[in-house]
Image: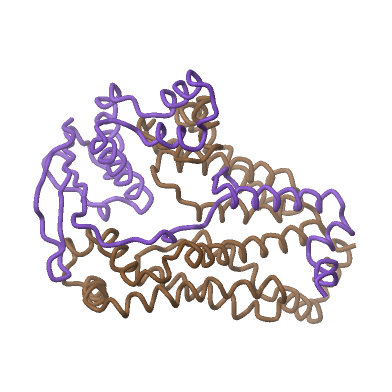
Chain colours: A purple, B brown
Amino acid sequence: MLRDFLRNSFLARVLRTDRALGFFFALFVAIQLLAQVLTAEVTPFFLYGMYSDPIHPSPTYVRMTCEADGKPVSQEDLPRYAGELFFSTLYRLEALEAAQGADLFEPFINERLGFLPGPLKGRLVRDLSFDPANKPALGAWMSRYLSRSLHRPVNSVVIAREAYRYENARPVRISTEVLLRH
Amino acid sequence: MLSQLEAPVLGNAYKDFTFWGFELLGLTNFFTSPGWSLAFDLLLTASVVLALIFPRGVLFPRIYCVAILMYFIVHTTYANHHYRPIIGLVLAGTPFAFRMPRSYTVFQAVRYYVLFIYTSAGLYKIFRGSWVNTDQMTGIIENTQLELLLLHSDGWHAHFFTWLLEHQWASWGLFLLAVWMETVFLIGYFTKRWDLWLFCTAISLHIGFYLTMRFFAFELIVLDLTLLPWDRLFRRAQHRSLALRWWCAKECR
């Protein structure tokens, strides 16, 4: 029965009728399965594991805020993709600041690519991580990007981190800290 | 468009080795530099327009597929968010990159990939144990809807989220329902008989994701179209249209 199922499967039929395309599909499936087993993401072989790890409520949550020329800018003030890109960048900046500039690559490389020689690992970490010396350039980019997305010139930008906790299912602010001024 | 990114400086190559390759070769910087980003955008747009003007050609869809994959890697790096649904834009172009009958075979392969997306999303939640975590949705809502609860606390959506936070059994029930609806796509590997129902399930999932997480991936909805019974629709149309019969006799040899 399993043999019949496999013989009549889509992949087997393609292999019989169009060998080249069939081999391409088989190779794609094999790499995809290998990526699943190794839990390694190699675009275009994705792992669709969003929200699959158990998530528990956290004592505090972070919200990033932006002020352009003294006026608050929220994600909704920007076009959809521009808003997502800009605010995701703010959360990335926040994660870097929270880790005192240490990027996510060093622990990952040590864990998954520990077999590589030390100098190569160091080079990978250096080339992939954000260089804190680029922080002024990041502020300048924020001005440029907001000017384009808001369709008005933006001369100053202030980025802050706000911490919240939930009380009776409603968020309550507990602190604010400025992370970047440009 | 890459030229609208204004040469960004803070990206994230994540734990994705293809992204690492682009970063280490300097391609992400190269494709977002002022002159080259504009040239890339023109190439990508022209490939789509020319594919529409010359629907029988396969060159322009092939250029589109390669260019949109590169766009995906560069844009996602600087979006600082590994937004996988954009892969829908890559896969949507692949059937057009081949001539008949290969085009139809690739179209069917995309259908299997769509099944894989939903099924693996469901199975991951089962095997990693999030489906038995009763405060899963509470954690997700508290983290992702903070902005909405602060800025639009009087709106219906904020009221709905507050209700879900106050009634954890309901939010967990919705999460379980989503896991079941994703896993049910397994049936599509064995038969096409339920494809129309799977299409409805996929659309319901997207509506549900929007209501419970304000997450709307239209790029995946494009791929869901592969679950429609195109064979039946095409045969019915063919019976009625002489022109379609003539075209099919020519193209489907």
Taking depth in this image into account, of B189 and B247 the one nearest to the observer is B189
Taking depth in this image into account, of B60 and B93 the one nearest to the observer is B93
Count of residue discs:
0
Task: Residue lying at the far top in this picture: please name it.
Answer: A119
Q: Is residue A166 above or below residue A78?
A: below
Instruction: Give x and y (percent) for residue A98.
Output: 23, 38
Instruction: Give x and y (percent) for residue B201.
Output: 53, 77
Q: Is residue B157 left or right of residue B1?
A: left
Q: In what quadrant of the picture does the C terminus of chain B appear?
A: bottom right
Q: Residue at x 51, y 75 (%)?
A: B181
Q: Is residue A12 above or below residue A103?
A: below
Q: Is residue B208 left or right of residue A48?
A: left
Q: Is residue A146 left or right of residue B11?
A: left
Q: Is residue B6 left or right of residue A119?
A: left
Taking depth in this image into account, of A58 and A72 the one nearest to the observer is A58
Residue A91: quadrant of the picture: top left
Instruction: Give x and y (percent) for residue B83.
Output: 45, 51
Residue B208: quadrant of the picture: bottom left
Q: Is residue A119 above or below residue A156?
A: above
Q: Residue at x 13, y 71 (%)?
A: A168
Residue A59: quadrant of the picture: bottom left
Q: Is residue B118 above or below residue B48?
A: below
Instruction: Give x and y (percent) for residue A6.
Output: 81, 67
